[in-house]
Amino acid sequence: MNLAALLADLGDVPVITDPAIVRKRSRDFFWYSPILNAQLADKSADLIAAPRTEAEVIRVAGACARHRVPLTVRAGGTGNYGQAVPLEGGVLLDITGLSAIEWMRPGALRVQAGAMLNAVDAAMQPHGWELRMHPSTRRTATVGGFVAGGSGGIGSVTYGGLREPGNIHAARIVTVEPEPRVIELRADAAQKINRAYGTTGIITALEMPLAPAWEWIELVIAFDTFLDAARFGLDAALSDGIVKKLLSPVDAAITPYFGALKSACPPGRAALIAMVAEPSLESFKTLLAGRGTITHEAPADEHGGRVPLYEYTWNHTTLQVLKTDRSVTYLQCLYPHDRLLESVARMNAMFPDEVLPHLEFIRFAGRVTCSALPVVRYTTPERLDEIIALHEAAGVHIANPHVYTLEDGSRYKRVDADQLGLKHEVDPYGLLNPGKMRSYVPAAA
Amino acid sequence: MNLAALLADLGDVPVITDPAIVRKRSRDFFWYSPILNAQLADKSADLIAAPRTEAEVIRVAGACARHRVPLTVRAGGTGNYGQAVPLEGGVLLDITGLSAIEWMRPGALRVQAGAMLNAVDAAMQPHGWELRMHPSTRRTATVGGFVAGGSGGIGSVTYGGLREPGNIHAARIVTVEPEPRVIELRADAAQKINRAYGTTGIITALEMPLAPAWEWIELVIAFDTFLDAARFGLDAALSDGIVKKLLSPVDAAITPYFGALKSACPPGRAALIAMVAEPSLESFKTLLAGRGTITHEAPADEHGGRVPLYEYTWNHTTLQVLKTDRSVTYLQCLYPHDRLLESVARMNAMFPDEVLPHLEFIRFAGRVTCSALPVVRYTTPERLDEIIALHEAAGVHIANPHVYTLEDGSRYKRVDADQLGLKHEVDPYGLLNPGKMRSYVPAAA
Ligand SMILES: Cc1cc2nc3c(=O)[nH]c(=O)nc-3n(C[C@@H](O)[C@@H](O)[C@H](O)COP(=O)(O)OP(=O)(O)OC[C@H]3O[C@@H](n4cnc5c(N)ncnc54)[C@H](O)[C@@H]3O)c2cc1C
Ligand SMILES: Cc1cc2nc3c(=O)[nH]c(=O)nc-3n(C[C@@H](O)[C@@H](O)[C@H](O)COP(=O)(O)OP(=O)(O)OC[C@H]3O[C@@H](n4cnc5c(N)ncnc54)[C@H](O)[C@@H]3O)c2cc1C
């Protein structure tokens, strides 16, 4: 790796070479996983390049290709399987300098990939729109990082995940070749960059659908048992006349770790965390009809640094526990949509006090089902593997969050064929985030 | 029935007594059914009262109660099971004088019951909103008539029918008692007036949820077979990322009757009629990916009396055929959501050339399924009953459109207990649309 020659080629693209900063930025939230923590702790890029325009992105990409230097894109750095960790050093391309909104029209916008999710929502709000969905890291993650490294989140109870047709309208990417090309991927084709960890091109812009920016009401509801919370969550999820953005049942064993929210979580009772559109609130409460007790109800409001309720849901649930108990970890499950509650009950009975249940209602391929991010009291890698195997034997799919390759982390244990195809096209030397797409063998050298 | 005394009591409420007009307005679209046509053709009210305010509605209701005169509400008169036909004469209360919008706010409005559906949508449009759903009679029916006599329609592919929690926020009703009361029914309680044919109170105002007023693109897509159209329709219905309002597969045996639309329906091919939000159009077409041929595509636009595409769908499909062939009639089916396409294929094979298939994709209790309004080549009442029985034996529910009582027309063959309860409360003498709620026996006399 000829870094000096590379640096010369970068011209006036801002660069950081201070090893302390570079090492720090080469990390993400992989430490969530005790297994990944052991594997990734010492990885680092050699330098950070921070382009301010697409032209500068092209300059960095071309230089990396000519000098055969690995290039890993980093955005908010909130991935939690080491998605943005450069396994083979090289350049860490900080994309957050590209953050402009290119255009918006009713129902859609085009934005540069490095824009922060909360900045995009704040800019759309006065027009009555917002992104359809966001990860629970809305305050720290980017649009491009979500599309390249995430899967779904708050809003997926209505729209499904990013992978559903219509949830990514288009992506613009820069290839890593001596003369980089700029390619526009539209509709289905844009899925080739979804959750590819930046191995299939540097995303510079995204066209995303928008949803009405409702006045969202945040609620915490206490239930006698976790299954009561899940049963009501399912009824609410199935109510197409009730507009909602979040339905998250959390077990009574988890809520004691909920810091500021603890007062809304009576000991020994399960909680359902919800976001409901104000005009649907009355119908939502009528559906609840005494099955649970509302312990918190307020309009969503992040002004003055107030912590949004969704920061207790999705992957944040585990983070809340990790804040006081570093010994836990988590899993990512997808429940089958038929006999959903039976499956949930069965899995919960299987690991008392070890796998602490937490569900997220979502739509998946048009059906209401649950994603689950249970908190796991970690003992050994072998036991973790056993827990995963027992879930899969029971028909509950696992996207393993304790591995860093696309293949091992997928429910299917292989990379999408379309993504592999695009990879060959845009990254002939295998320089983009090397080591993450295991199936890929570079054609050129 | 002392009509002279009643008339005196009505004061200056506008009244029509001309028998020709009264007889004409005592009819609706029951002639769709050869069976109802025979039963209802000679029914008529004695007079029409046309109140202009809720105070005048109360005056009519009180007078009818005191003089024990039947009272049947009539709005647009587009029901097709004789919902608004007075079986025992008396007063036909024309509610269309109450048509004001009381208020609107983002996501909800409150409107007087006699407002026309298209007028409401036109008034909401500049604010970026519209009703979530409407029957295919949007241009001639009222909000109150839809809620009291209908079930769902264009929009139900996203929001389900009117019966889903959240699809009616509240109703204000006037009782039929010597001193009428005004009652506000909210959330769940408002379901007691849904599809009760006006037997459970005179609705004067409704609070309804609103949906974003998308730019809707109307499409006709030709498919080789009806099942191809249904299969694609299901895929599109299951795509939560694609915003749509209508997905209606229609058999090749029906489209030749489609007048102006015939040019978009190639002979021998099935059609899918669709309404898709403009920002979702590209994803919708990508999903189509050559499985069918788009033969018509244009923004929805009813200006200058242009016929909207939805007037070829829902109950209008049968009307289009009836325009040239008075010998046909129809059924109303609800398919099971599991093994949907298998059931559709099975039923279609059972009655070739006799039951001509036409589906409407809807959400029902949170699941994607189909309502079906097939066109039936009518022979005898016995054969019609047999066709109904064969559907039910195959697990396809029928809401029989050839009967005029609530009970016989329901899938459960009984009236909702809540509705029966409200009936006793608001109509002690059994004067509201008598004969439609069979189970009801008046307590007073
Ligand atoms: C507490 C917590 C909660 C979380 N909750 C959720 C959740 O609810 N839903 C969810 O899906 N995920 C969740 N995540 C994971 C993470 O995917 C999201 O936080 C977010 O999508 C990452 O965005 P980012 O900007 O931080 O991207 P980064 O972490 O910087 O990058 C993520 C991946 O995308 C690549 N990438 C980033 N930008 C580009 C680009 N412009 N071009 C090409 N590749 C690029 C990176 O190389 C990396 O592989 C959570 C993580 C944490 C720590
Ligand atoms: C061609 C055609 C297509 C149709 N398509 C659909 C469809 O897609 N979906 C659907 O659900 N229906 C459909 N219908 C049936 C009909 O229900 C709808 O057209 C509409 O809902 C009726 O509204 P209206 O104003 O004409 O009511 P009317 O026909 O006047 O009344 C309907 C019933 O409601 C009662 N009613 C009306 N207003 C009030 C009030 N203010 N208070 C108390 N009771 C009242 C009447 O007494 C009557 O029983 C269709 C009918 C036809 C003829």
Image (cartoon, coloured by chain):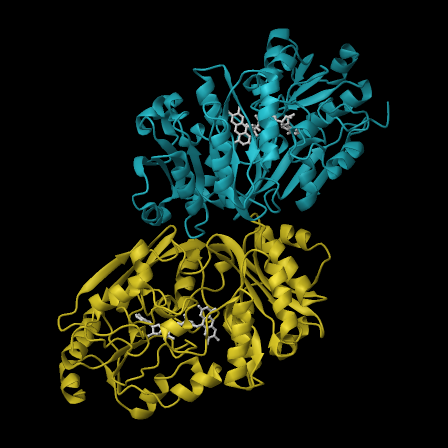
Chain colours: A cyan, B yellow
Which of A266 and A343 lies nearest the eye of the viewer?
Answer: A343
Quarter that holds the C terminus of chain B = bottom left
- Identify which residue is drawn at 66% across, 38% down: A171
In which quarter of the view is residue A253 placed? top left
Drawn side of residue B58 relative to residue A140, left or right: left
- Identify which residue is drawn at 67% across, 40% down: A191
Q: Is residue A194 above or below residue B330?
A: above
Task: Where is residue B368? Give x, y as percent.
Answer: 53, 55
Which of B241 and B374 lies nearest the eye of the viewer?
Answer: B374
Drawn side of residue B149 relative to residue A421, left or right: left
**How many numbered circles are shown?**
0
In which quarter of the view is residue A60 placed? top right
Task: Determine the residue located farthest toward the right in the rendered image.
Answer: A444
Q: Is residue A163 above or below residue B6?
A: above
- Identify which residue is drawn at 79% across, 12% down: A1
Task: Where is residue A107? Give x, y as percent.
Answer: 53, 48
Residue A113: tell me if it is visible.
no
Task: Where is residue B48? Give x, y as percent.
Answer: 27, 83
Which of A218 and A215 lies nearest the eye of the viewer?
Answer: A218
| Quadrant of ligand 1 in image | top right
Quarter that holds the N terminus of chain B = bottom left
Task: Where is residue A390? Give x, y as percent.
Answer: 59, 30
Drawn side of residue A411 relative to residue B120, left or right: right
Residue A298: tell me if it is visible.
yes
Q: Is residue A115 above or below residue B46?
A: above
Drawn side of residue B381 relative to residue A282, left or right: right
Which of A227 and B359 lies nearest the eye of the viewer?
Answer: A227
